[in-house]
Amino acid sequence: MKILAIETSCDETALALLSCTGGLRAPKFKVLKSLISSQISVHRPFGGVVPNLAKREHLIHLPLLFEEMKKTIKKTKIDVVAVTVGPGLEPALWTGIGFAKEIHKKYFPKAKLIGVNHMEGHLFSFLLSQESAKQTYSVKNLSKLFPAIGVVVSGGHTMLIKMESLTKWKKLGETRDDAIGEAFDKVARVLKLPYPGGPEIEALAKKGNSKAIAFPRPMIGSPDYEFSFSGIKTSVLYYMRDNPDANTADVAASFQQAAVDVMVKKTEKAVRQFSAQSILLSGGVAANTALRTSLASKADELHARFFAPSHAFNTDNAAMIGVAGYISHLRKKNRRLTADANISL
Ligand code: KG4
Ligand code: ZN
């Protein structure tokens, strides 16, 4: 079946057209087109995402992307229109939902219109990790991946999830304060680097010594699967206040190492406790090479398989919304088409 997916939960306007086959046992996705219009340059002067500017930009870019997408759609019969309904910025979410309703009515009235949880999009994006042919993705022996530990790390969330299958999962724990991506963004601000901070910190960290400064690893040994990242950020702030001439590359590398250590340790604990067969990393921070390589080598050590989406599908995109839309459709999960800024997994 063909799915047209729409994502507008934060600062990326995205549309994707996917051909989905294989059902829940062996899902296979051909990404026929994935379009993303980033608003980074609009929000950069403000050091973070401004909700009303995000809304304005989505309203401008949705029709433009759709015009571009029409060149690929041509006469293709669209079976499902999938749109993100949350979590995210409410004004931004509404623009996507409104647009989905509009094009559904005008162009694809026979298609099913479904709401998608953005976090399910990230969680299922591991299905976009192995390219079997050009732009075609499937995971071999999918059933052998479970139980799996999903590690979802983004600008708004930090979660560990135990997945029994594509239809059954449970949240083990999440952050009590800042998300890991938020910590990267805030530390970047302390180091006077532009927004979004994640890629900037990663680039600077490559030139530094990750053992130079012993930043704290909050909750690394706690008996649960909860996280806390605001303490590391505050430590960086105090360190820079007390050492204004510090080598910022060392600060970036040491901060990144502290954050990675916490993620790896807690994931290891979950893999051991639940005898997980795989680790599924996703979300914007999954683009971070230090985190990817550390988790991949930990997976190796634990004899678990490791998956992370292909480069284009780590940060927000609509292809992952199409994937989660396909799974939701197969599960006959009908979400209301209203924005829910705080919807959980
Ligand atoms: O998933 P995403 O695009 O949006 C949300 O759903 O939040 O994640 C964005 C977050 C931002 O905080 C950004 O700084 C972070 O992902 N990020 C990174 C990297 N690339 C993006 N963090 C660390 N290293 C990176 N290379
Ligand atoms: Zn996201």
Image (cartoon, helix red, strand yellow):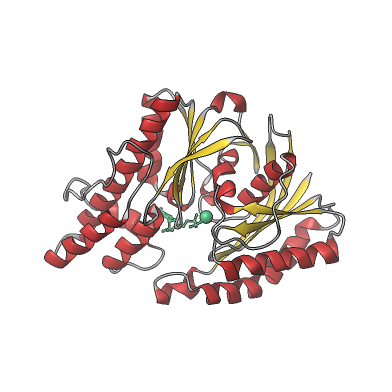
The quarter of the image that holds ligand 1 is: bottom left
Give whichever of 191, 336 is nearer the camera: 336
Q: Quadrant of residue 225?
A: top left
Residue 174 point in image, percent of width and height: 42, 47
Res 105 seen here? yes
Residue 13, placed above or below residue 206? below
What residue is shown at x 55% (from left), y 50% (from top)? 119
Give whichever of 339, 96 is nearer the camera: 339
Q: How many marks?
A: 0
Give whichever of 338, 72 is nearer the camera: 338
Is residue 37 rendered to the left or right of residue 198? right
Q: Quadrant of residue 163?
A: top right
Is residue 244 rendered to the left or right of residue 104? left
Residue 159 point in image, percent of width and height: 45, 45
Residue 280, placed above or below residue 83? above
Residue 129 point in image, percent of width and height: 56, 39
Give whichever of 304, 68 is nearer the camera: 304
Res 244 seen here? no
Residue 157 point in image, percent of width and height: 45, 53
What residue is shown at x 17% (from left), y 60% (from top)? 247
What residue is shown at x 23% (from left), y 50% (from top)? 254
What residue is shown at x 79% (from left), y 57% (from top)? 73
Q: Quadrant of residue 173?
A: top left
Is residue 98 rendered to the left or right of residue 131? right
Quarter of the figure with the N terminus: top right
